[in-house]
Image: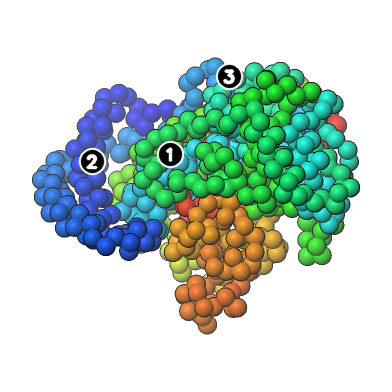
Amino acid sequence: MVLYTSPFPNSFLSVLHSFSWGLIFPCYWLADRLVASFVPTTYEKRQRADDPCYFHALCIIITTPIYLALLVASLPFALIGFLLWSPLQSARRPYIYSRLEDKNHANGATLLTEWKAAGNGKSFCFGSANVCLLPDSLARFNNVFNTQARAKEIGRRIRNGASRPQIKIYIDSPTNTSISAASFSSLVSPQGGDSTNRTVNAGIKRTTSMEYKGDNSGSNNSEDSREDKGGAGEPNEGEENTCIVRINGEDNGHMSDTETDTVNGQAHASGPAEPSLEGDAESSKTPNHKQKEGDSGSLDSYSASRESLVKVRVGDGTVDQSTVNNKLLYKASIMKKTSVRKKKHTDETFDHEISAFFPANLDFLCLQEVFDKRAAEKLKEQLHHYFEYIVYDVGVYSCHGCCSFKFVNSGLLFASRYPVMDAAYHCYPNGRGTDSLASKGALFLKVQVGSTPQDQRIVGYISCTHLQAIAGDTTVRCEQLDMLQDWLSEFRKSTSSSSTANPEELVAFDVICGDLNFDNCSSEDKLEQQHSLFTHYKDPCRIGPGEDKPWAIGTLLDPEGLYDEEVCTPDNLQKVLESEEGRKGYLVYPTSKNHSSSQKGRKASLKGNGRRIDYMLYTEEGLYLEWKVEVEEFSFITQLAGLTDHLPVAMRLMVSTGEDDP
C-alpha cells in the first residue's frame, strides 16, 4: 500500500486548493476572533476582575465593529473560495504521511535491529491523549484558549517527556518510601561498576522516571546525545536510557534538609542548566507556559518539589566534573511501589501510576481533536524532534466519503518511532448533532517493529479512534464500535502478506487507542460497557462491565478548575489526583439522576474515581501463537496540565518470545 505524502495526487490540485483556502481563510479567521472575544475562559475572567479600568471591555467595543466590517468585506471572496474548495475535496486523500527528512536524525531503521538484540522479547510503549486543538473560539467552550501556542507547547512537552532517560530505583524496605542521602549521592556521583547496568546493592523495586534536558529535547535531533549513547556501549535504543540504582535502608530512608541541600549542591555543582530551545513569544500568551518553581512539566524550570522531583547528574564509572559539566540534567518523578501490595491490589501483575511525565522511550502516540490545521502543523514540527513518522490531517471534508457535510477533519494524529507500513482511514457515517460536522472516524496503522534472524518481518497493528461525544447517544457509539471492529478486521486481512503455512510476518501486538466518550461506571453507558469489543480486547483498568480497578482514575478534567493554582502545573495536578478528595474536586464524575450535575456539593455520593473515557486496549487474539503479550506498566499522565481538559494515558506492553526467536 502506498502512503500518501501529500493531500492531492498532483501539484495542480494542490495549488488550486491553496488558492481557494487563501480566499476562505480571512473570513474564517475574522469570524473565529470575533466569537472568541465574547467567550472568555476562567483565567481571563480572573485577570479582568483585577482590572479596575475595564480595559478589555473597551477593547471589545472598539474591535467588534472593525471585525464585523472586515468580515462582511471578506464574505464575497470566501464564497468564491468555497465554491472552488468544496469540489476539490472529492480528490483529496484521507491523510498526510510525514517522515523526518533529515537522515542524520532518523533512527527508525536502527530500531528494527533491536528485536534481534533483545533475544527473548521487547517492550513497546503506547500513549494516547485528547488535546482539544479546536479553532480558538470553539476551544474556549472547553475553557482552553490560544490554540496555536498550545499546540506548540503540547508537542514540546510530549517529546521532552518521551526523550528523557528512565531510571529504576530499588529500595530495601517495603515501608520506606523516601530516598536516603546516600541514595542521592549514588545518583549524583556513581562510582565504577558496570556502565551498562549501573547497579548498586539489592532491595525492593521502585520505579523512577527521569526527564532529560541536554542540548535539545529530542532523541532524533541531537548529535551530542547519540555520541554519549555510543560511548556508553549500549546497543539497544529501548534500553540505553535505563539506569538501575539500588538503595540501602540503613538510615531508614530519612533525608534531612541539610543532606538535601548538600545533594542539590552536588547536582548543580557543574553549572546552571541549559536554557530551553523554545523561547518563542507565543508561549507567553497563555497561563500554562508561565512555569513556576517545581513545575515538572516544563524543561525551563530549574527546580521542583522535593517530594516528586530530583535533579542529578549521572556519569559512567568515575565522575569527572569537567566532562559531566553541562551534559545531563535529570528530574526524577518517583512512583511509590512496594513489594507488599495493598490487599485490593494483590491480583495486579503490572506497575501503575499517576505520572508527571510522558513515559520515557515512548514508541507510539495517538492524539484526538487535532482539528485546527495550522495547529496540526505546529504540533507535527515539535513531535518530529522525537518521532520519525507522523500521520496527520486525517479525515474527509465537504460531502466526500460521508453522508453529511464535514467542515473539519477527524482530529486524529499518529506519531511513531517505527516505520509505518500501511495506513487506512474510515469515517463514521452515523454522527449526530454537532459531531456530524466533523469527520470522526478510525485510523488504522500497520508498523514494522523488527525482524527475526530468518528475516521475517515483525509487525504490529494500532487503531486510533474518537467516538460520538453527545451524552445519551449510546446506540450511536455502539454502532461505531461495531464498525470499528469490522474495519479493523478488514484492514488486517487486506494488509497481511502471510499464510499459516509460510508466515512472512509475525504479529507482535494489536492495540486500540482513543477517546471513546463513555466510561465504565456511569449507569447511562451500560450498553457500551457490555459491548463485544471488550470480549476480544482487554482493558488494563477494568475488572468487568460497570467496575474499574481501584487504582484507575478518570481522564476527564472539570474545565472550570483548569487554571486553579492547585492543578495548573503537572507536578501539582499529580499530587492532587493522588488523593481521593483532590480527584473529587477536579475530575468529572459519572452522572446520576439522583444528584445535581454540579461538581460541588455532592462529593459524598460520587461513584468511582472519575469518568475514564480515554482508553488503551490490547488483544492476544490474532498474534503469533508462540508469543505472549503482557501489560508491563500503565500510567495516567499530568504533563499537559493547563493545556487540555483530558488526562493522557500510556501503556507499556511486553512481547515475550521465549529463549529464542522463531
| Residue 164: % across, % down | 63, 35
Q: Which residue is mark 2?
A: 25
Residue type indicated by callout 3: Glu
Find numbered disc 3 in the image and state the secondary structure of the residue it sits on. helix
Dots 1, 3 in contact, CB < 8 A: no
Mark 2: which amino acid?
A: Phe
> Residue at the spot x=23%, y=60% of the render?
53
Return the x and y of residue 66 as percentages of the image width and height.
13, 50
Give amino acid for label 1. Answer: Lys
| Residue on which the image places disc 1 | 152
Q: Total number of numbered labels?
A: 3
Let me know if residue 515 appears in the view.
no
Q: Name which of mark 1 and mark 3 comes first in the sequence.
A: 1
Residue 283 appears anywhere in the view: yes
Q: Determine whether the residue tagged by mark 1 lies in a helix, strand or loop.
A: helix
Q: Earlier in the sequence, mark 2 or mark 1?
A: 2
Q: Which mark is residue 223?
A: 3
Query: Relative to 567, is 139 on the left or the right?
Result: left
The image shows residue 540 at horizontal and vertical percentages of: 69, 54
Relative to 13, is 206 above or below? below
Q: How far apart are the two marked residues, 1 and 3, measured between alpha carbons?
A: 23 Å
User: Reading the chain from its start, which is encountered first: label 3 or label 2?
Assistant: 2
The residue at the point 79 percent across, 35 percent down is: 186
Q: Nearer the viewer, residue 489 or 185?
A: 185
Q: Residue at x 60, y 29 (%)?
A: 271
Task: Residue 644 in the image: state x and y as whole percent.
Answer: 46, 52
Measured in 3D between alpha carbons, the distance from the residue under mark 3 to the one under mark 2, in whole angstroms, is 40 Å
